[in-house]
Amino acid sequence: MKNLFALLFFILLFSSCTVQQPLYSWSKYEQASYNYLKNSDANSAQFLIETYQKIIDKQEGTRKIVPPGVYADYGFILLQSDKEEEGKTMLLKEVETYPESKVFITNVLKILEQ
Amino acid sequence: MKKLLLVISALGILLSGCTTTAPVSKFSAYRGLYEARPVSVLIMPPINRSTNVEAKEYFHSTLNVPIANAGYYVIPPFLSMEILKRESAFDSELFFDVPLTKFGEVFGADLALFTVIHKWDKTGLLSQVYVEIEYILKSIATNEILYTRKGNITYDTSVSTGASGVFGALADIAASAINTAATKYVDVARICNAYTFKDLPAGKYSPVYLTDSTQVAGPKEFTVRLNSQYK
């Protein structure tokens, strides 16, 4: 009987301890996006680009998939720096990874072609 | 007799837990979200009622990470902000009470996140950073408000860590370094986001999608005071 109580106690203890692991890892995204908004110069753009690359190359989140919006925003920053082909490739990767982005990205590509 | 005492004390404990308002499950608090099962979120440009003109874009940049981490698809924030500017849709005030179908057509999103920055201030003498933000998630298809919370966060930059001894001194030095260099409004706003979205029903990419409906929902409005110990 005592053992049963001990068992219950431990079950309760551990059930409340299951800390959820994050779905994605974001590298230094928060810092990089803030700097980019604040300074909007070549250095901050470069830092943001490197951060996107890190997020894409090494995903440590539980989903092991690049987080929503990263491919597309990376593509956008590349387009801003006149890297048109690379930029478009990234936009298409967003759709491939997240089909729910198709409507928006298709519209963006239309605007780009105007 | 002993038994009676036990029963009475057990009842006492039980009832003492009932003095506050009864807990509400996430399902009853955010029923519309559980029923609509939205997948994607468009972050609208924040509505800035504070005196700080920079708050709008800075705050906007803090919102995508917590919502994605909650399991939703977030429309790419930099790219969508650019399109909203181009389409002269930078002032969300104009769209709060009108049908959002156009946003559905352009962005293909299920939800629009409106935020209102009520305060984004440093309160002079006390070296406090104070943000007051309201969050409203609306269904793009029906215009229904599916989630709303309001947070008041005060971050006190002058407080010592309260730790003592050598480690305490080190901790204090570290804390004051954070204060002078990095305590930006955005950091405080991020904390406000974290508190707010702790309550957001999980999205489809989360392992607790739909099963979190029995968890207890937090209050619609909350106030939190933090000092440099908070990480």
Image (spheres, coloured by chain):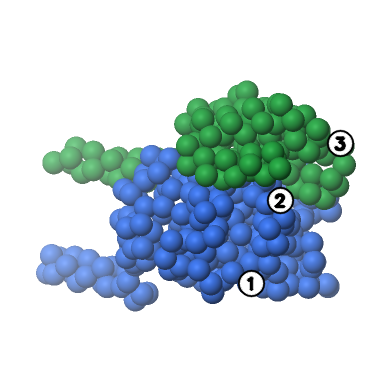
Chain colours: A green, B blue
Q: Chain of mark 3?
A: A
Q: Quadrant of residue A73?
A: top right
Residues beneath discs 1 and 3 located on the same chain: no
Q: Nearer the viewer, residue A63 or B191?
A: A63
From the viewer's perspective, is residue B231 above or below residue B98? above
**Mark 3 belongs to which amino acid?**
Asn
The alpha-carbon separation of the residues under discs 2 and 3 comes to: 20 Å
Q: Nearer the viewer, mark 2 or mark 3?
A: 2
Q: Quadrant of the N terminus of chain B?
A: bottom left
| Mark 2 vs 1, N-terminal side | 2
Q: Position of residue B211 (x, y in %)?
A: 31, 48
Mark 1 is surrounded, within 10 Å at the Cα level, by few (under 14), some (14 to 19) or many (20 or more) other residues, namely some
Query: Residue A44, which numbered label?
Result: none
Q: Position of residue A19 (x, y in %)?
A: 44, 41
Q: Chain of mark 1?
A: B
Q: Nearer the viewer, residue B138 or A80?
A: A80
**Mark 2 belongs to which amino acid?**
Glu
Query: Residue A43, which numbered label?
Result: 3
The alpha-carbon separation of the residues under discs 2 and 1 comes to: 18 Å
Instruction: Give the residue at mark 1.
Output: B93
Q: Position of residue B10 (x, y in %)?
A: 22, 66
Q: Nearer the viewer, residue A102 or B57?
A: A102
Q: Residue at x 55, y 50 (%)?
A: B107
Check if mark 2's residue and mark 1's residue have beta carbons within 8 Å: no
The alpha-carbon separation of the residues under discs 1 and 3 comes to: 34 Å
Instruction: Give the residue at mark 2.
Output: B82
